[in-house]
Image: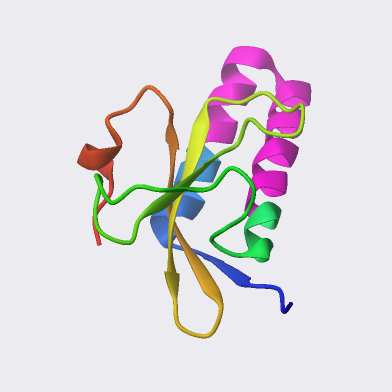
């Protein structure tokens, strides 16, 4: 099975920068590094495709939207990777949002 390509939208890249800046400010650079690794591992899991372990269809947000919580494989975290699939085995990561947020208010296509 071929690996899927994961592409980050500009807003997802900004989300990561904001998350890591906030984490460093509140918990220090070491914890920001740990959380950066947690986010990276979640994104890498998407190379398995939209059916990656823990990914869920979220048509309640918008048709074709899926999410993957970053808290997986013993890692802790409070964010969802919000994504959709596109042609040629591509995963488009739209946002990375805190799990306390109303996801429907922050996802646009």
- Residue depicted at x 24% and y 54%: 62
| Left or right of 9, for residue 58 | left
Total labels: the figure holds 0
66 left or right of 8 in image: left
The image shows residue 104, relative to residue 1, as above or below, that is above
The image quarter containing residue 84 is bottom left
Left or right placement of residue 11 versus residue 75 in this view: left
Q: Residue furthest bottom?
A: 88
Location of residue 75 in the rendering, given as x and y in whole percent from the top left corner: 73, 28
The structure residue drawn at horizontal position 51% and vertical position 32%, both measured from the top left corner, is 79
Residue drawn at x 65%, y 46% is 42
Quarter placement of the N terminus: bottom right
| Residue 52 pos. (x, y %) | 62, 54
Q: Does the stretch in magenta take in 42?
A: yes
Quarter residue 109 falls in:
bottom left
Q: Is residue 87 above or below residue 15?
A: below
Residue at figure coordinates x 21%, y 39% from the top left: 105
Q: What is the span of residues highlighted in magenta in the rendered image?
A: 19-43
* Furthest-left residue in this view: 105
Asked whether 87 or 97 is in front, the reply is 87
Give coordinates of residue 107: x percent, y percent: 28, 48
Q: Position of residue 51 (x, y in %)?
A: 57, 58
Closer-to-camera residue (37/2): 2
Q: Most prominent secondary structure in the magenta stretch?
A: helix
Q: How is the image coloured?
A: rainbow
61 in magenta: no
Instruction: Identify which residue, 22 or 3, lies in the foreground.
Output: 3
């Amino acid at each position: 099975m071929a690996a899927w390509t994961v592409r980050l939208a500009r807003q997802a890249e900004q989300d990561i920068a904001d998350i890591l800046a906030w984490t460093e400010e509140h918990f220090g650079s070491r914890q920001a590094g740990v959380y950066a690794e947690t986010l990276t591992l979640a994104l890498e899991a998407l190379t398995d495709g939209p059916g990656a372990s823990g990914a869920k269809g979220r048509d309640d947000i918008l048709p074709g939207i899926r999410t993957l919580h970053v808290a997986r494989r013993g890692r802790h975290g409070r964010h969802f990777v919000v994504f959709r699939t596109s042609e040629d085995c591509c995963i488009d990561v739209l946002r990375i949002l805190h799990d306390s947020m109303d996801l429907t208010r922050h996802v646009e296509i």
